[in-house]
Amino acid sequence: MSVRTAYLSVVVAAALSVASSAAADAIDLETRLRGQLEAVLKDAHSAQLEILSGPTQRKYVYMGFESEGQVVCTRVNAKNSYGGYVGWRPYLFTLKPNGAIGVIYGGERHSDELIQQLCGA
């Protein structure tokens, strides 16, 4: 094996390791977000979750309180009480330094304004 081939093998292995780590982090994030959906949805197991952006560090004001943390912009399609999907709706998750996760979903004026401000949705 030449020096160049050995070098390329190391570079490819490093790139695969980084990609694998990023994929694992994304799966862990989705698992954590789905855990929060269980608290707010009637049938969280059937929910379709799409992460649109994040996590990104942001400062924001919600219901008169200033806060700072990482935000994740998503959309969720979940079933209602009749078993039918209601359509994609914006959800904003806040990740606090202490590990807590908050969820803010559209449908009310103050939440819609914040989601529009932070996610552009």
Image (cartoon, helix red, strand yellow):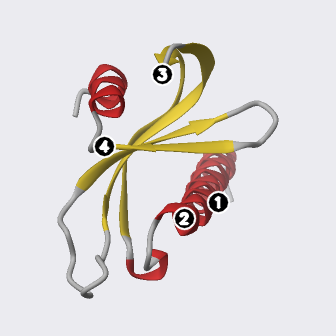
How far apart are the two marked residues, 3 and 1, measured between alpha carbons?
29 Å
Q: First in sequence, mark 2 or 4: give its number.
A: 2
* Circles 3, 4 touching at the beta carbon (< 8 Å): no
Element marked by disc 2: helix
Label 4 crowd bin: few (<14), some (14–19), many (20+), radius 10 Å: some
- Report crowding for label 2: few under 14, some 14 to 19, many 20 or more residues within 10 A (C-alpha): some
In the picture provided, is 18 more to the left or to the right than 48?
right
The residues tagged by marks 2 and 1 sit, at their Cα atoms, a distance apart of 10 Å
Tell me the quarter of the image containing the N terminus: bottom right
Labels in figure, total: 4
| Residue name at image x 45 percent, y 68 percent | 41
Q: Earlier in the sequence, mark 3 or mark 4?
A: 3
Instruction: Provide residue 73's location: percent of width, then percent of height.
Output: 39, 40
> Which mark is nearer the camera, 3 or 2?
3
Q: Amino acid at mark 3?
A: Met
- The x and y percentages for residue 36 are 59, 59
Q: Which residue is mark 2?
A: 34
Q: Which residue is mark 4?
A: 106
Disc number lying in front (3 or 4): 3
Residue annotated with mark 1: 28
| Residue 1 placement, left or right of 71 | right
Residue 63 is marked as 3
Three-letter code, disc 4: Gly
Mark 3 neighbour density, 10 Å: few (under 14) some (14–19) many (20 or more): few
Q: Nearer the viewer, mark 3 or mark 1?
A: 3
Q: Is residue 3 above or below residue 62?
A: below
